[in-house]
Image (cartoon, helix red, strand yellow):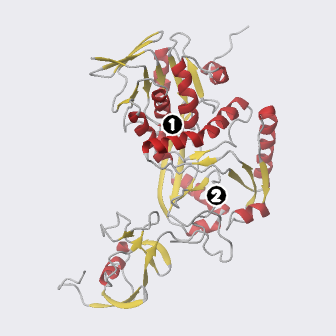
Amino acid sequence: MFRLRPEAPAATVPVTVEGRTLLVPEGASAAAALLLAGQVSTRDSAVGGGARGPYCLMGVCFDCLAEIDGVPNRQSCMVAVRAGMAIRRQRGRRSSVTGNAGVPPACGPEARGPR
Amino acid sequence: MTRCFDAIVIGGGLVGTAIGYGLARAGLKPVLIDEGDVAYRASRGNFGLVWVQTKGLGAPHYQRWTRASAAAWPRFAAELEENTGIALGLEQQGGVQLCLGDDELARRQGIMQEMQREAGNFGFEYRMLDRAELAAMLPGIGPAVTGGSWTPYDGHVNSLALFHALHRAFAARGGVYLPNRTVAAAEAAPRDFRIALGDETVAAPRVVLAAGLGNAALAPLFGLSAPVRPQRGQILVTERTTRAWPLPLGNIRQTPEGSILLGSSEEEVGFDTAQDPAVIQKIARRAVLTFPWLAELQIVRAWAALRVMPPDGLPIYDESARFPGAFTANCHSGVTLAAAHGALFAPMIAAGALDAALAPFSASRFDVPAAA
């Protein structure tokens, strides 16, 4: 669906999108990498679970949230790619009590983790 | 042009809309006058707690009124949701006030003991939780937390949804909403009030002053007094996470959608609504001492707003002695007390007189006693 403009610099920077390696131009955003990888929907809403994709591509709408190098909920349109960057779709909410593996979740319908 | 109503409510925030909705529900035709977005709008800046356990030390009538509101909340919310289709996210499974350090815990325990003593036959159920109990209940709790107090009465709600729903329900019940109007002039006589709003005038046998900080200037026009001052509070909001805790924790709560709200401050800075980085830092530091894992979360929003604070921190409810039919309602707990305002206070106004239980809330408590 999305492709590079002819005048774009050559795709030389290797990143992984959902585990798959892809070359993207230097200076491109992580959101652009997601789109180039064919991920039109880059996250699932944290509330309703619906698919969302990069909309404004300028740091305003927060619809391009993605997990970048293990950090959840990053605005992928505001992050420039680096060689070896690991980019993943943001699937619903991030987990709450991070760094506390083994601690049982609190009660409530969503206690079993992100959708 | 003069339009006649059964009641004029001045103030379109949570207090005014809750009362307006309650009046319309009681079969009256009310008009709601709202200054608009130039107003300070505590209703848009609050934390969203339905909170009981910190209210009314040394003033058992305030504890009783707050409890009455908490008890009225489930039905009030259900009816609003049914009438408007707006989900309020009310949860009332109790709440915990967390303490850092031994002094804070000892103080908290003393307050709870005293409030139970003051409650007498009315009762006041609470339990002090030690660190081990809290750790089992609240994953990721920090080593600085020494304990906390629990009561079954506390809860929280989406206060913006509440605000929206109250406006909707008010209009659906036939209430007339006049936004972007300020009171240009007021004429008061017993059970006969006329308010000039620029190009039009509204008239009614009842008027309710629910204009928050604006009440201070309005009250004297009706033979009333409302010596309220602004008190600034600041709030931080994190990105959404999976459910972290089963209940709200006073100045930390998680919405059903996953955002975590961190509060709060009590700042005496007049009508200054600017944010203060030093205060933001203090709020964040306490939150991270309470739950160290919160430090990993991004803050996505932060704001400051002004509480409506009477001199002793207790609400003001009054009827004018000089102009019967004129009432005031002032408080800093427009969310907690919304159910009381809609389901208890408004029916009193519809009936024409405040209940004796509200007598201690009269602003006459601030009058200097006459010299002997």
Label 1 amino acid? Gly
Q: Could you give the CA–CA distance between mark 2 and mark 1, rounded to whole angstroms?
A: 25 Å
Q: Is A25 or B164 nearer to us in this picture?
A: B164
Q: What crowding class fits label 2: few (fewer than 14 Cα within 10 Å), some (14-19), or many (20 or more)?
A: some
Q: Which residue is mark 1?
A: B270
Does residue A55 appear to the left or right of B136 in the view shown? left
The amino acid sitting under disc 2 is Arg
Residue at x 48% of width, y 40% of height: B42
Name the residue at 31% across, 85% down.
Answer: A26
Residue at the extreme left of the image, as rendered: A6
Q: Quadrant of residue B252?
A: bottom right
Who comes first in sequence, dot 2 or dot 1?
1
Q: Chain of mark 2?
A: B
Residue B37 position, x and y percent, is 37, 39
Residue A68 vs residue A103, the one in the foreground: A103
Q: Residue at x 60, y 21 (%)?
A: B363
Q: Chain of mark 1?
A: B
> Does residue B353 appear in this view?
yes
Q: Is residue B50 above or below residue B35?
A: below
Is B275 in front, or is A101?
A101
Q: Is residue A87 above or below residue B58?
A: below
Q: Which residue is mark 2?
A: B286
CB atoms of marks 2 and 1 within 8 Å:
no
The percent coordinates of residue A20 (x first, y second) are 40, 90
User: Is B268 above or below relative to B210?
Assistant: below
Can residue B59 be seen in the rendering of this structure?
A: no
Residue B266's image quarter?
top right
Would residue B298 appear left or right of B67 to someone viewing this image?
left
Q: Nearer the viewer, mark 2 or mark 1?
A: 2
Residue B323 percent across, percent down from the top left = 50, 11
Where is the N terminus of chain A found, in terms of image quarters? bottom left
